[in-house]
Image (spheres, rainbow, N blue to C red):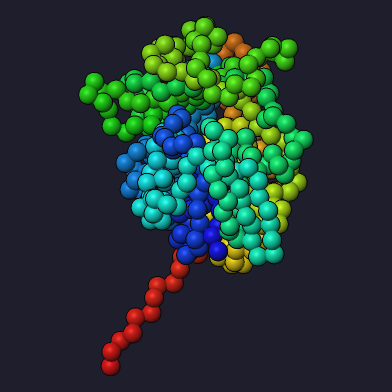
Amino acid sequence: MTVLIAGGGIGGLTLALSLHQIGVDCRVFESVPALKPLGVGINVLPHAVRELIELGLLDRLDSIGVRTKELAFFSKHGKPIWSEPRGIEAGYKWPQFSVHRGMLQQILLDTVIARLGADAILTSHHIKDWRESDGGVSADFIDKATGKAAGSYDGALLIAADGIHSAIREKLYPREGAPLWNGRILWRGITLADKFLTGRTMIMAGHEILKFVCYPISKDPDANGKYQINWVAERHLPPTYQWRREDYNRAGNLAEFLPHFEQWDFDWLDVAGLIRDCPHVYEYPLVDRDPVDRWSFGRVTLTGDAAHPMYPIGSNGASQAILDARTLTREILAHGEVPAALGAYEAERRPATTELVKLNRRNGPEQVMQIVEERAPDGFEVVTDVLSQQELEDIAANYKRVAGFQVEDLNAKPPIVPTPPAPVMSIAG
């Protein structure tokens, strides 16, 4: 029978490709009328890039993204705190990619259509309800724009890959309410600008209350020699501040955050200039949800942001959705399209992502910037006068451990989805 996937984002499309890889029929149902390459930049970490490479997508990734060379942390004065190599330069067998989220989704979509056929994806299909029987599940869909019925479909399993506002999770946890806002706002954009540092560096500057992140997402310059630089400006507002909490993707107002970054003109990066020169700025409240103690209910389970929405700290949102898809595929290969596969998948992924959600709430590896701000708010000459080398290394190592991408461990791990054996060729005698 067919596996029904609610949601055509990065996680849902990766799952579709993975199930096709092991010979399992599936279909993707997406709420919107058309899947378009929307969004801004994201990073895909080596453990997730590995999975995309095993789906045959390395050349496509190289065509749309930048192989991230290093991650560097700086104070609000632009002084270096910590830097470390990333991807191949760090000793991984696989690169890390900085990409436009929408372009990554587009190559996954194009590949699904090429391999599974255009009828494998149904748009304007928003899940309304489902019913289980001994042998499968039947899901009902509507066209969300009109409210009209869009049909019912039968399958062996129903997978919720429908994001932080998951309709399936809402039915499983009807009293959960809206995502949790912690008082922090992100303003995001992409600006054409000169490259900085190595040209493949991802930087984070500032501290918990005021932070700036940026990295290139185009490896080749435009006709004017400029590169696409993805940036994120973050501001932590007082708990009493009345913000537009329910608006999760709206045009940003420069007056609400640019003044806080006007003086951030480092020798190697003009932060205020990047913000001012951006043609389209978007505003996102920083939200997540509390981890739940169960994802799987009979023939239904949660994945990606429907299962474990987390703060975009440590570049882990898309990466963890990809790992979910691959782990779920492995368990379906091992157990079949039955509830036992969902239980085995959850047993591995839920504890791991729960720990990561909680660690991201404590700022993950970015806590080094807050420690420096607290100890030396007026600046420093050498960071080790403020924070010992051992403290720096311990913070970085702990995050890699929790997120599952320690170099030696990842390099030694077998593939999540076993490579199918090559067919035996007969030899004529």
- From where the camera sits, is residue 157 visible? yes
Up-down relation of residue 156 to residue 148 (above or below): below
> Furthest-bottom residue in view?
429
Image position of 335 (left or right of 83): right
Closest to the observer, 278 or 271: 278
Image position of 301 (left or right of 314): right
**Would you identify the image quadrant in which residue 156 lies?**
bottom right
Closest to the observer, 139 or 429: 139
- From where the camera sits, is residue 415 visible? no
**Which quadrant of the rendered structure holds the N terminus?**
bottom right
Closest to the observer, 138 or 1: 138
**Would you identify the image quadrant in which residue 144 lies?**
top right
Residue 24, given in percent of the width and then of the height, sits at: 50, 63
Closest to the observer, 73 or 211: 211
Residue 140, given in percent of the width and then of the height, sits at: 61, 48
Residue 426, given in percent of the width and then of the height, sits at: 33, 85
**Would you identify the image quadrant in which residue 191 lies?**
top left
Image position of 109 (left or right of 394): left
> Furthest-front residue in view?
148
Identify the residue at image location x=44%, y=38%.
35
Identify the residue at image location x=59%, y=66%.
336
Residue 152, given in percent of the width and then of the height, sits at: 58, 51
Up-down relation of residue 111 to residue 206 (above or below): below
Identify the residue at image location x=59%, y=29%.
366
Up-down relation of residue 199 to residue 160 (above or below): above
**Which quadrant of the rendered structure holds the C terminus?**
bottom left
Identify the residue at image location x=73%, y=31%.
177
Image position of 140 (left or right of 279): right
